[in-house]
Image: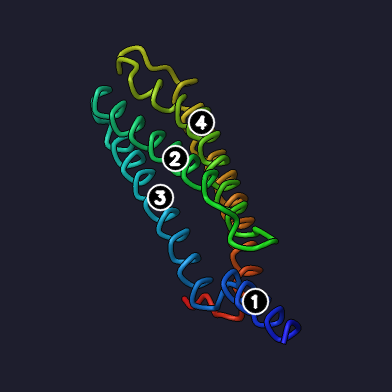
Amino acid sequence: MKYFFSLLMFAFVFTGYAQTVDDAIDWNDQIVTTQTVMLTFEDALVEVLAEGMPGGIVDIVYESYINYIDYSIKYYKAEDPFDSQDIFRKAILDLLADFKKIAETEYAELVELNNKPIEDLTDDDFERWDYLANRLDELEIESNADFLEAQQAFADQYGFSLGD
């Protein structure tokens, strides 16, 4: 009887902490939503920069983007690992850290160039703008590729398809 009770308790504890495929899909969806919202903030920043909006507007959009990334980093750092491997939580934290670094370097310089009076812009400024735009694309492509690789590993681990 003691053996049966111990086995029953072990099964209860084990299943209480085991993650299901549905749990994994929900976790994936939550993280993808975080990524999607971050990219929406970034798109808004790109749009106001591309349209040459006044500095005050660009500054507000830029700060909103940074604030969302900061909030998301704090959120996922505070979250418990999904499982012992913690693949996907680490992946979103890496992605967020990469995008924050890009925001604080390449985007910060683009914002600075945008806020410069048009009559003070030089050919070097325009060349720098092009360089920064290309550089941030390269960095983001690399970061997104790493994230997608981790996402696929997570999906494979739990046996679900990422779909389109």
Q: Secondary structure at mark 3?
A: helix
Q: Nearer the viewer, residue 115 or 79?
A: 79
**Residue that carries the numbered disc 2 in the rendered image:** 69
* Residue count near mark 4 (Cα–Cα under 10 Å), binned few <14, some 14–19, many ≥20: some
Distance of label 2 from label 3 (alpha carbons): 10 Å
Q: Residue at x 73, y 82 (%)?
A: 2
Question: Residue 78 location in percent, x, y?
Answer: 52, 44
Task: State the residue position of label 1.
Answer: 9
Report helix, strand or loop for mark 1. helix
How far apart are labels 2 and 1 at the CA level? 42 Å
Query: What is the CA distance from the residue labelled 1 to the residue labelled 3?
Result: 45 Å
Instruction: Residue lying at the far front in this picture: please name it.
Output: 1
Name which residue type carries label 2.
Answer: Ile
Q: Are marks 4 and 1 in contact (CB under 8 Å)?
A: no
Quick one: which residue is furthest to the right in this view?
Answer: 3
The numbered disc on residue 107 is: none
Question: Residue at label 3?
Answer: 39
Q: Are marks 2 and 3 in contact (CB under 8 Å)?
A: no
Instruction: Give SS at disc 4.
Output: helix
Disc 3 + disc 4, Cβ < 8 Å = no
Q: Is residue 141 left or right of residue 107?
A: right
The mark closer to the camera, 2 or 3, is 2
Between 71 and 47, the one nearer to me in the picture: 71
Say which amino acid is labelled 3.
Answer: Leu
